[in-house]
Image (cartoon, rainbow, N blue to C red):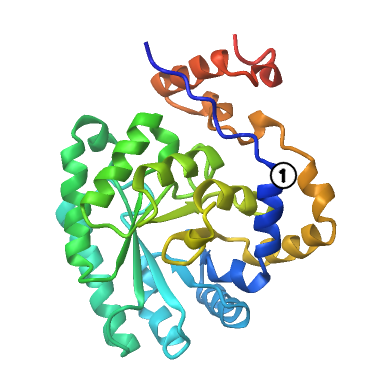
Amino acid sequence: MESFRVPLVEFPQDALVEIARWLTPQRLASLIDVTDLKADTQEPKIHEMVHWAREHGFYSICVNPVEVDLLPRLLAGTGIRECYVIDFPLGKSTIAMKAHQAAQVVAQSRTLRGEGPGWVELDMVINVGRFKQDPEYTRREIASVVEAADGEHVKVIIRSSELTDEEIALACQIAKEAGAHFVKNSTGMEAFGATPDHIRLMRDAVGPDMGVKAAGGIRDALAVIRLIYAGALDPALRTPDRFRLGTSSPLGILSSLRDLQRDLETQIATPPVPCTICPSSHAEKLRPALREYHLRRCRQCPHRAHREGIVP
């Protein structure tokens, strides 16, 4: 009989207020990877993202690998990192192909930027199907990309929306043991993106000495505060090396932070409807086995009344 765990959908007001008061625009910006991974992204958008990063202090620009012929030149001398996704978004290339792409991106970036190592990050996608069948395969693919990255930081996208709680914990542990620097929940193109519950599971799995990156659907400061509560409750974890946010809406988040802080107590005093931020609320979008896993959890959940008429 599978054990039931109450999802993280409730937040102490005093903890959220503490995070909100700590979260200046500069601190928030330092945790953000500004992201655009769309198929139709063109050069003007890359220039615009670089401008945002330079103006506000965002940590990195996260793009598809094709932009490695442009981004290093634009970021040289700025102190802003480059971030490239590897085998995005499905993670279905072979291990050798992933490692080759990682090595090629790192080499080209270093050549064009001319500032040596330390400016590249690689967000690699695991092969979820192979992971479910053979977790050791995942260990080998992550280790191969880490080796190919030649010391540059590797973030492992586990596609948590397609995993059970137990699989999330195992994937994170494997990523840690394989030498990755971060675990990341989502490509932003799955059934759902960042939820506090999954970010908490990931932090619990890797402990305080590894980074956790939340990505997918993050558009406002209140969502950010809940994610920080889940993944970086300890102020010592609120650094770019331990916690990161991937978003295509960085300016909107900064603007909403200003709005939130003008009326902090009122906004934070209004709790979220639990099922709007719970992973199981997306069950209908998932494969049958995982859908049933989530629906079973809903039937046992003390917040199930919010889904009356949805969960049989």
Instruction: Name the spot of residue 55 as percent of width and height, x first.
Output: 62, 82
Between 175 and 200, the one lying in front of the other is: 200
What is the quadrant of the C terminus in the image? top right
Is 12 on the left or on the right of 280, as rendered?
A: right
Q: Is residue 238 above or below residue 120?
A: above
Q: Label 1's element?
A: helix
Q: Residue at x 68, y 56 (%)?
A: 18
- From this viewpoint, is residue 50 visible? yes
Instruction: Name the spot of residue 157 as percent of width and height, x first.
Output: 37, 50
Is 17 on the left or on the right of 146, as rendered?
A: right
Is 247 on the left or on the right of 262, as rendered?
A: left
Q: Is residue 80 above or below residue 254?
A: below
Between 44 and 52, the one lying in front of the other is: 52
Q: How many marks on residues?
A: 1
Q: What residue is disc 1 on? A: 13
Q: Residue at x 65, y 64 (%)?
A: 23
Quadrant housing residue 269: top right
How many residues crowd around disc 1 within 10 Å: few (fewer than 14), some, or many (20 or more)? Answer: few
Instruction: Name the spot of residue 74 as percent of width and height, x first.
Output: 46, 85
Q: Amino acid at mark 1?
A: Gln
Instruction: Name the spot of residue 120 as percent of width and height, x first.
Output: 34, 73
Quadrant housing residue 47: bottom right
- From this viewpoint, is residue 190 visible? no
What is the quadrant of the N terminus in the image? top left
Q: Is residue 80 above or below residue 311?
A: below
Q: Residue at x 65, y 40 (%)?
A: 11
